[in-house]
Image (cartoon, grey):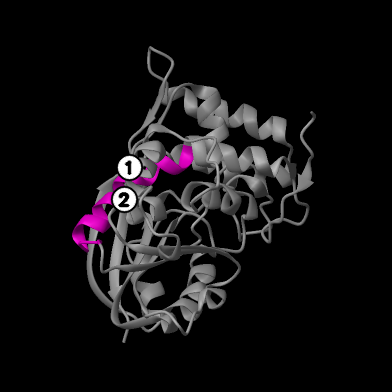
Amino acid sequence: MTPTLVRQHSSHAGTTPRVDLRARARDWSEIQERMLVPLYEAVYERLDVGGGTRVLGLGCGSGLALLMAASRGAAVTGVDSRFPERLDLARRRLLPGTPEGHGTADTRDARARADAVRADAVRVVEGAPRDAADPSMPAFTLVTAFEPIGCLAGDSDGLAELLAQATPLAGRGAAVVLAGWGPPERCATTSVLRVATKLADPLRSAGSWRPALRDDLEEVAQRAGLRPDGSGRVACPFGYADADSAVRGLLSTGLFDAAIAATDQEQVDKELAEALHPHRRSDGTVWMPNVFRYLIARTP
């Protein structure tokens, strides 16, 4: 069956590209999402996430970070309003009786550990954080925003809006974790992401790549009325089986949508492949060391 092409919504481009959203969600889930596993693990270990933790995951996507928290005994709620196709995959991973049908070794191992999670300890909500409110349940003790900011112009604005809705659902002194790209000189993927800026409409700054700034996370926390309470850096290398997987994984992030809209898919694919060439190893794999940063803040 020929996949149905549907229009990808993007607030950053005047003309939006047409893509197969289900295929893109699968690429995210099977190729790209696992690149941030070291970040999830570092945060959960530092905060001792376990049986007494109630997690609200903002922009939860296809649910790998939630699955890892659930495997540690936490009760998890994920919300996402931008990627319903990813959210469908999250339901398959997290909710009992829903066939998963896909996944990397990371997701399968976590799923095996989470199989005993009670159905009432997992919720997947399509919508805004306010839609996750449930007066009958205790307040959340941990709010996570693992989608890294500090890469696209204006990306912190959307996060601030999410936090404004989410923090009232958390208890006093609850941890709120924000994530961001590390310094450009510590992220090999920086050179590849510049393709997005090169090809995007130069008259539109929103949606274009920009270098991460040192205080990106602190500024968002301050705007949300949160109190910083520690930070850390985590190595998250992007490793792919081959150049084709690398292109598919990077496109699944949505970071190149403005470039696709300004040019075309073929042009973006070509320039992405060229930008990846210096990162290809003799066996054909692609390897890009990166450092990501996280900030732990506290609700008032």
In the rendered image, residue 28 lying in the magenta stretch gets the answer no
Q: Image height check: is 174 above or below 44?
A: below
Residue type at the position of mark 2: Leu
Q: Position of residue 15 (x, y in %)?
A: 78, 52
Element class at badge 2:
helix
**Structural distance between the alpha carbons of marks 2 and 1:** 7 Å
Residue that appears at 58% across and 71% down: 128
Count of residue discs? 2
| Residue 200 shows in this picture | no
Q: Position of residue 227 (x, y in %)?
A: 28, 80
Q: Amino acid at mark 1?
A: Cys
Q: Are marks 2 and 1 in contact (CB under 8 Å)?
A: yes
SS of the residue at dot 1?
Answer: loop
In the displayed structure, would residue 235 be above or below residue 167?
Answer: above
Dot 2 alpha-carbon crowd within 10 angstroms: few under 14, some 14 to 19, many 20 or more:
many
Read off the residue under disc 2: 39
Q: Outermost residue, top direction?
A: 282
From the viewer's perspective, is 87 left or right of 123?
right
Q: What is the quadrant of residue 187 in the picture?
A: top left
**Mark in the foreground, 2 or 1:** 2
Relative to the observer, which residue lies in front, 150 or 144?
144
Q: Which residue is mark 1?
A: 236
Q: Which secondary structure class fits the magenta region best? A: helix
Write down the region rendered in magenta.
Answer: 32-50
In the image, 198: left or right of 68? right
Q: Which residue shows up at 71% across the image and 40% down it?
A: 20
158, above or below 245, in the image: below
Q: Quadrant of residue 247?
A: top right
| Residue 175 makes an appearance in the image | yes
- Placement of 13 over or under 120, stated as above or below: above
